[in-house]
Image: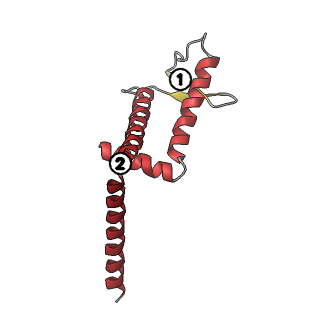
Amino acid sequence: MPLAVSVFVIIDILLGSPAANSILGIARAQEAANKDDSNSNNNNNDGTKKTGTGGGLLQVSTKGERIDSEQVANAAIERARNALEWNTEREKLKTDYDRMEDIRKKMDDQMREFDEKKKQST
């Protein structure tokens, strides 16, 4: 599971962080709504939750929700941050030999893929 999260985070970074931006956009909107409604209660009596979307409030139904999706989302964001931090620290601690080995492995993989494509085309 940590490997999957790490791969997702790395791919997301390489793509310009679209997933992180969307997740953080939602979190920022919720944070703004919490600041605006700091004196009022965010939960209505009808089972809906107010969520800020910049200019106004969006009503999100939470009826029948057995788990706290906001808590799950925050935990996922925290795990992704931890994975990103771990990966950056691991990259910082690599020696020149480790970097050369990584490059050698990538080159071997590329050559293997090239050979497979060459065999398939002939």
Tell me: residue 105, above or below residue 9.
below
Farthest-out residue, top: 39
Q: Position of residue 106 (x, y in %)?
A: 36, 64
Tell me: residue 120, above or below residue 105.
below
Chain-order first, disc 2 or disc 1: 1
The structure's colour scheme is secondary structure
Farthest-out residue, bottom: 122
Residue 79 figure quarter: top left
| Residue in the foreground of this view, choosing between 30 and 44 | 30
Q: Amino acid at mark 2?
A: Lys
Tell me: residue 36, above or below residue 56.
above
Q: Residue at x 45, y 28 (%)?
A: 70
What kind of element bears circle 2?
loop
Q: Position of residue 14 (x, y in %)?
A: 49, 53
Farthest-out residue, right: 55
Quadrant of the snapshot with the N terminus: top left
Q: Residue at x 61, y 23 (%)?
A: 33
Q: How many marks?
A: 2
Q: Position of residue 9 (x, y in %)?
A: 43, 46
User: What number is the disc on residue 49?
Assistant: 1
Cα–Cα gap, marks 2 and 1: 46 Å
Left or right? Give the position of 50 relative to 69.
Answer: right
Q: Position of residue 91 (x, y in %)?
A: 39, 47
Residue carrying label 2: 94
Q: Amino acid at mark 1?
A: Lys
